[in-house]
Image (cartoon, rainbow, N blue to C red):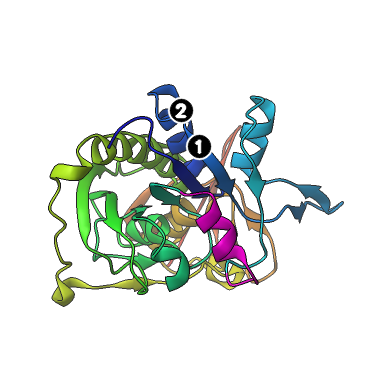
Amino acid sequence: MDKNSRILFMGTPDYATTIFNELLEQGYDNIVALYTQPDKPVGRKQILTPPDIKKYAIENGYSFPIHQPQSLKDKDIDLQIKDLKPDVIIVAAYGQILPKTILNIAPCINLHASLLPKYRGASPIQQAILNNDTYTGVTAMLMDVGLDSGDILGYKYCKISDDMVVGELFEKLSKVAAKLTLEVLDDFEKLKPKKQNKTEISLCGKVKKAYGKVDFSDAKDLYTKYKAYKSWPDIYLDSGLKIKECLLCENNSQNSAGVVLSIEDEYCIVGCTQGSV
């Protein structure tokens, strides 16, 4: 695809920002508009806060229009996008499903943070950690009306280390996705999209606060949830106490659940029915 191609970008968190920044730095800078989620109240004081990618665009003084519709199904959104005459629409963790009226305007390329058809849905990075996968990756696909079901344009793989928490994996995958985006755009006319293998489909939904609740029955399970849910919703006990930092000691010993086995200067070791943290 020519670097003068008119690009409409849709994305919201820092995962999207990393991809967006790489596009601009590598000369794909003919951005006709940025679509992102509406500003949201954050923290105890509920301060209205822009999405990461909007903040990045404003701080860097970019002049392209920024749109934040509550829904892409809102009246005339499709006409607004059609008037922008995009040659391609890049989507990265936008947070909304694109209706068919928008999909028909231009090729829509989604950078999904899993090796599709594995982990279609909203939380592929957390799911890869929860399943103790050794590898994950990013898939570039042509979007259709289904949930992450479009034809595949390319993959890039990424190794998950044993102690990698969700934020670290997000950051690593965003860099992988940025490189894959460039490769797909550079070779777009030569690529032959491939159908997904329907026998390998798995799904993952939005992460809910309730998922962070843990107990001291199994040390490995507790640590795995800590890695997947660190930062949000965090892991917490039935009492409401959050566990902000955690390491797996071992998963062989048998103990009374929740008993403090030792107290050191900077940590304590807590026994689980199986193992300790």
- Give, as a three-letter code, the residue at label 1: Ile
Q: Which residue is mark 1?
A: 31
Task: Note whether residue 274 is visible.
Answer: no
Magenta stretch: includes residue 74: yes
Side (left or right) of 78 relative to 185:
right
* Label pair 1/2, CB-CB below 8 angstroms: yes
Q: Count of labels shown?
A: 2
Nearest the viewer among 249 and 234 is 234
Residue drawn at x 38%, y 60% is: 124
Indicate the position of residue 92 as horizontal and vertical percent values. Answer: 44, 50
What element does badge 2 sit on? helix
Q: Which residue is mark 2?
A: 24
- Which stretch is magenta? 73-85
Check disc 1: other Cα within 10 Å, few if <14, some if 14-19, many if 20+: many
Indicate the position of residue 104 as horizontal and vertical percent values. Answer: 38, 65
Say if 85 sits above or below 147 in the image: above
Residue drawn at x 27%, y 37% is: 1
Nearest the viewer among 49 and 247 is 49
Badge 1 or badge 2: first in the primary sequence = 2
